[in-house]
Image: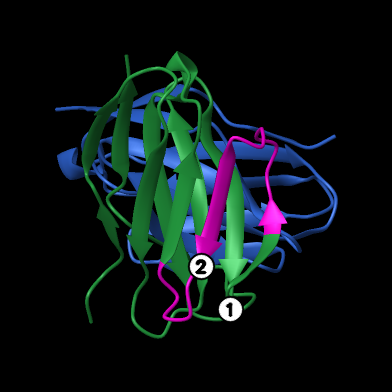
Chain colours: A blue, B green
Amino acid sequence: GQSLEQPSEVTAVEGAIVQINCTYQTSGFYGLSWYQQHDGGAPTFLSYNGLDGLEETGRFSSFLSRSDSYGYLLLQELQMKDSASYFCAVNRDDKIIFGKGTRLHILP
Amino acid sequence: KAGVTQTPRYLIKTRGQQVTLSCSPISGHRSVSWYQQTPGQGLQFLFEYFSETQRNKGNFPGRFSGRQFSNSRSEMNVSTLELGDSALYLCASVQGQNSYEQYFGPGTRLTVT
């Protein structure tokens, strides 16, 4: 079968660093994506890992380990506007499968 | 460049009715995917169209169907609506056939009563 697991909720403090993990089990895998969705908004693309290792985009970084079927999204210098849901998504050869999302709460 | 647009934004229907939702992708994007988003299930893939052909389909009943026109605009139809079909329906477009970056529209909020 196929599945993605990510925590349902994570809480962190403004200015801190938070890591959102994602483990997957799927066939036909060729990459892992991350999307951000604010309440009432549409998902927006954050990053993509097609190869093992770390990809950095400003305050956000994403990591992939194919051998461990594991990835994570790292958010640094958290700001209140980062309060949102974050989805990992497996890019397969036929479609993209999304996890159920992690709700990130940021405390002042 | 204009983003992905979806119409209508909100819709209320009665159980047993049918509904058609529309999606216009970003200009130049030829692939459109549809997703159903509910609080309990997250984003679930419905189907994908590329150059007017359905390339992939998710695990939804036949009541859910779609099509794509020559200008890449896409529609999805749900017949014989059920209460459980209440959800946010999102469409996303990508530039190339195997691009990984999807651009989502604002969604259509469907409520079935």
**Is residue A15 or residue B10 the one in the foreground?**
B10
**Is residue B50 or residue B81 the one in the foreground?**
B81
Residue under mark 2: which chain is it in?
Answer: B
**Is residue B25 or residue B22 the one in the foreground?**
B22
Residue under mark 1: which chain is it in?
Answer: B
Residue marked by disc 1: B51
Splitting the image into 4 quarters, where does residue B86 fall?
Answer: top left
Judge whether residue A40 can be spotted in this image: no
Judge whether residue B70 can be spotted in this image: yes
Q: Residue at x 36, y 48 (%)?
A: B21
Residue contact at pointers 2 and 1, CB within 8 angstroms? yes
- The label shown at residue B65 is none
Quick check: is B59 in the magenta stretch? yes
Asked if badge 2 and badge 1 are on a common chain, one would say yes
Q: CA distance from mark 2 to mark 1?
A: 7 Å
Amino acid type at mark 2: Gln
Whether B33 is drawn above or below B65: the answer is below
Q: Residue at x 31, y 65 (%)?
A: B4
Whether A16 is drawn above or below B52: the answer is above
Q: Earlier in the sequence, mark 2 or mark 1?
A: 1
Image quadrant occupied by the C terminus of chain A: top left
Q: Is residue A63 left or right of residue B39?
A: right
Q: Which residues are magenta?
A: B56-73
Whether A45 is drawn above or below A4: the answer is below
Where does residue B91 sit, x and y in percent of width and height? 42, 54
Task: Please tell me how crowded label 2 is: few (under 14), some (14-19), or many (20+) other residues with Cα within 10 Å.
Answer: many
Residue marked by disc 2: B68
Q: Residue at x 25, y 52 (%)?
A: B7
User: Which SS class for mark 1?
Assistant: loop
